[in-house]
Amino acid sequence: MPDLLTSRAATDPDHTALIVAGQGSLTLAEWDERSTAAARALPGPLKGDRVALVFGAREWLDYAVSWMAVLKAGGVAVPLSDRLAPPELAYMIEDCGAATVVHGGGDTALPPKTAVPFKELVSGPAVREEPAAPDPLSLAQILYTSGTTGRPKGVAATHANLTSPPVHPKRRPFAHSRHLVHAFPIGTNAGQVMLLHALTAAPAVVTLPLFTPARFAALVEEYAAGTVFVVPAMAAELLNARVQDRHDLSSVLLFGSAAAALPPSVAAGLTAAFPNATVANYYTSTEAAPAQTIMIYDADRPGSLGRAAGGSRLRIANADGSPVAAGETGEVWLRAAAHPRAYYSADRESSDRKGADPTSTDRTSDGTGQEDAFRDGWVRMGDLGRLDDEGYLYLVDRESDVIKSGAFKVSTIQVESALHEHPAVADASVFGVPHPVMGTAVAAAVVATGPLALSDVRAFLSTRLAGHELPTVLLVLDALPRNAAGKVIKRELRRMAEE
């Protein structure tokens, strides 16, 4: 990773890599120089040591410098948001065995580790010479999964993984844009992808510390952004706020959605709100990246997540990994072209230091029954899906979210997509709740733009869904509970429904 920054900074030093709305910007030369100075001031030997980076959304520039500084010093960066609850933050720092914590200097409660405020780091004396370039197969970062169904797990990526696939200097991504706008938080896989785009892509990457539809649309208009990235919840908020009525969004040529499936009605609405944009849905996971599927919105395939892209491989398989026939439902498996990720564990790190392959898939146990999430270079995505005759992927549901109601299996994705078509529904999530006869019943939580009763919802859905798919419980909320990555925390909805 450091080589990518140093080489590009040498050829294009004045290119603006990062802009944080209201906070400033960072050129490639500044990023390279400041991260080198910070690397020399980091305490400890650091070779292979984990360094937790705890920063807020307004501190993207300082975070980017710190992240690269850790890699230049031979360490392993562990990006963490300061919005995490103190127990979560303490767990992640302890779980990865971080030797040092670099933070933005806020009032976040940090465990009693070697905590270094960023301002002290960049102004402190050098304690080391610039180290030799890291081995491409050595670990570069650990990202923690969102933890929507259990405790977050650390996913380790090597330098080779993060630099794959290679970017040719004359064919940089998003060359149609001078600016790329996003609002992903620090500590998420989507946020890290945007940081890599700042390093390798053609446009300057612009981020918004706090997302609101009006602020986001204003930022797109201000920079005449050619590329925009959001999560589906943000996309729905932009449509519900009708930002296109107050802002010129004609500059957007690519509107990308990541982190979850984009409901077909939302995708269709985006094509109208952003008249010049190609709407694309990106499907991957923290574990599978950079493997992904990409789907350009197609009204003839409204629910598809596309086909494998960028050298990735995709298959629908049985639990033993054998592929199923086109049209049959099975587990979704993704595979990167090379250098897969793995779950991090202290035992594996010890083995790595003795010369073992850090991407070996025979050491992927996370202690929670997910020993085979990685298998022979493939990643089991935890989703159920099917492929059509042309290889297009359709998700059926998260394997853990499928509602088994009596003799039926209900897809929460299908019910959510139908709910998004209701004119009074601004956001929706579907989940199962205990039922004395059926075992599990369908429940829905919605954010409504007006009064909404369960009878109204059932009547609307009755022409779109089967009887066993209709919700029997309705929660009307001001907002759905989401984690930092924008994913709905369904266990919280189940608790609310039970209460």
Image: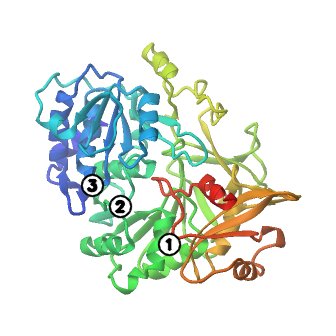
Q: Depth check: 403 or 434 in front?
A: 434
Viewed as shown, does residue 454 lie left or right of 351? right
In the image, residue 249 above or below residue 70: below
- Marks 1 and 3: which is nearer the front? 3
Q: Is residue 100 left or right of residue 402?
A: left
Horizontal side of 248 relative to 261 (left or right) equals left
Residue appearing at x 15%, y 34% in the figure: 37
| Residue under label 1 | 236
User: Residue at left 64%, top 30%?
Assistant: 371
Q: Residues within 10 Å of mark 3 (few under 14, many from 20)?
A: many
Q: Quadrant of residue 275?
A: bottom left
Q: Is residue 157 visible?
A: no
Q: CA distance from mark 2 to mark 1?
A: 24 Å
Task: Name the front one of labels 2 and 1.
Answer: 1
Which circle marks residue 47 in the picture? none
Name the residue beneath numbered marker 2. 174
Asked whether residue 377 appears in the rendered view, the answer is yes
Q: Amino acid at mark 1?
A: Ala
Q: Position of residue 229 (x, y in %)?
A: 41, 63
Under circle 1, the secondary element is helix
Q: Quadrant of the C terminus?
A: bottom right
Q: Amino acid at mark 3?
A: Arg
Q: Quadrant of the N terminus?
A: top left
Residue at the spot of label 3 = 58
